[in-house]
Image (spheres, helix red, strand yellow):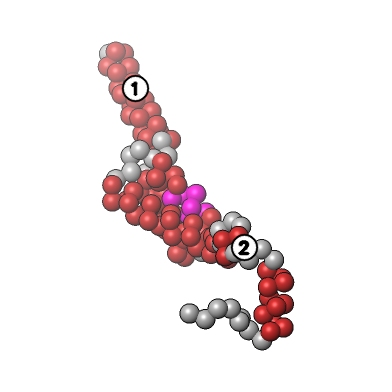
Amino acid sequence: MWIISLRKSLGVLSVLLVSSAMSWAGPKPQEVFKDAYYQEVHEGDLAGAVRLYEKVIVDGKTPADVLAEAKSRLACCVEDLRAENPASLMPPNVGRVSGIKRAGQASRAIDRDGGYRGEST
């Protein structure tokens, strides 16, 4: 008799352990994606959305369609964050790229001469 009650107790205990272990495993990638989308669209928290989208991408259990959407939205968020500071969009050493080494002197010359008077094509 006590063996049957012991088996029932162990059965209930194992069900409780399995269910609690599943809850400790953390949220599913789809749920994290929904949270990231909410942060991006409704809260306007792009940095928070980036962190959550990165979690979705790193998770190995993310379905392919959710993974593709997370990568796309992550790229958009990163671009929007960079666009908040226009200087970050410029390549380094932009003066060298454009050939202007002394931009201040060039702008004073343009102001002084009334415009650019280079070679005409």
- Tags 2 and 1 in contact by the CB under 8 Å rule? no
Residue hosting label 2: 95
Q: Is residue 13 magenta?
A: no
Q: Which residues are magenta?
A: 48-53
**At 38% across and 28% down in the image, what residue appears?**
17
**The quarter of the displayed image where residue 117 is located:** bottom right
Instruction: Evaluate whether residue 73 shows in this view.
Output: yes
> Relative to residue 28, is residue 115 drawn left or right?
right
Type of amino acid at the residue the image marks with label 2? Gly
Q: Secondary structure at mark 1?
A: helix
Estimate how packed mark 1 is, as few (under 14), some (14 to 19) or many (20 or more) residues with alpha carbons within 10 Å. few
**The quarter of the displayed image where residue 7 is located:** top left
* Residue 22 on image: x %, y %: 37, 35
Q: Is residue 52 magenta?
A: yes
Estimate how packed mark 2 is, as few (under 14), some (14 to 19) or many (20 or more) residues with alpha carbons within 10 Å. few
State how many labels appear: 2
Type of amino acid at the residue the image marks with label 1? Ser
Q: CA distance from mark 2 to mark 1?
A: 76 Å
Q: Nearer the viewer, mark 2 or mark 1?
A: 2
